[in-house]
Amino acid sequence: MQEPPDITALLNRARQGEPRALDDFIRLVYSELHRLARAELRRDRDGHTLQPTALVNEAFIRMFSGNTPEFADRAHFLGIASRVMRQVLVDYARMRRRKKRDGGLRTELLANPVVSKPAPDLLEIDQALERLAEEDPRLVTLVEMRFFAGMTAEETAEVRAESVHAIRHDLRYAQARLRQILDGAPAA
């Protein structure tokens, strides 16, 4: 079985002017974005009308309309894709909230079955992520890759060239810090 082409190699070939490389890159990243979107939307416990293809198409349009973006490598691409997917989901939640009082989009990112308090909605989480970004942008990138792009800790560690242990540790810390932010607690 032939391995799929490497995103970084395709990017390098596209930068060198090989026309087919850009087409191959777009085909490859589109399928990867679709896989990530399916994983993200499958975890959404409230369900909504946004389908994986719609999420991917919107993210794809935002990423590739206008100038062709310059991605350094697979990790850079997936980081940007994660952020764009978060923006699409947040925009979707805002639109739904405008249409009805509570948009209903909630995420399992900070759901705690032990506490009867409902999980924060996506807009509350987005605001908390903005505050966390002021403290540590890297943690926000990890959260986006894990919870908005649906990547596993192993996938995140691989594309970021970090240990799985470090990624899992930092994700636990990010979740704890986000809970503190949402509860109004100051930084430790």
Image: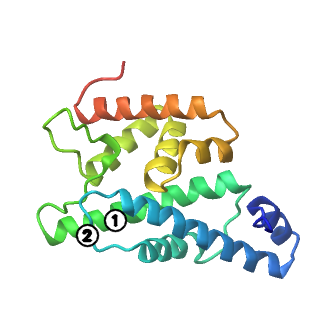
Q: Position of residue 64 (x, y in %)?
A: 60, 74
Label 1 sits on what residue type?
Asp
Label 2 sits on what residue type?
Met
State the residue in front, 36 or 73. 36
Q: Position of residue 146 (x, y in %)?
A: 48, 47
Residue drawn 20% across the image and 32% down it: 114
Residue drawn 32% across the image and 58% down it: 44
Q: Is residue 17 above or below residue 179?
A: below
State the residue in front, 178 or 111. 111
Report the residue that reaches farthest toward the top. 188
**What is the distance, in whole Å, between disc 1 and disc 2 at their CAs?**
6 Å
Q: Residues within 10 Å of mark 2 (few under 14, many from 20)?
A: few
Q: Position of residue 136 (x, y in %)?
A: 49, 33
Residue 95 is marked as 2
Q: Residues within 10 Å of mark 1 (few under 14, many from 20)?
A: some
Q: Position of residue 38 (x, y in %)?
A: 45, 66
User: Marks 1 and 2: CB-CB under 8 Å?
Assistant: yes
Residue drawn 51% across the image and 62% down it: 36
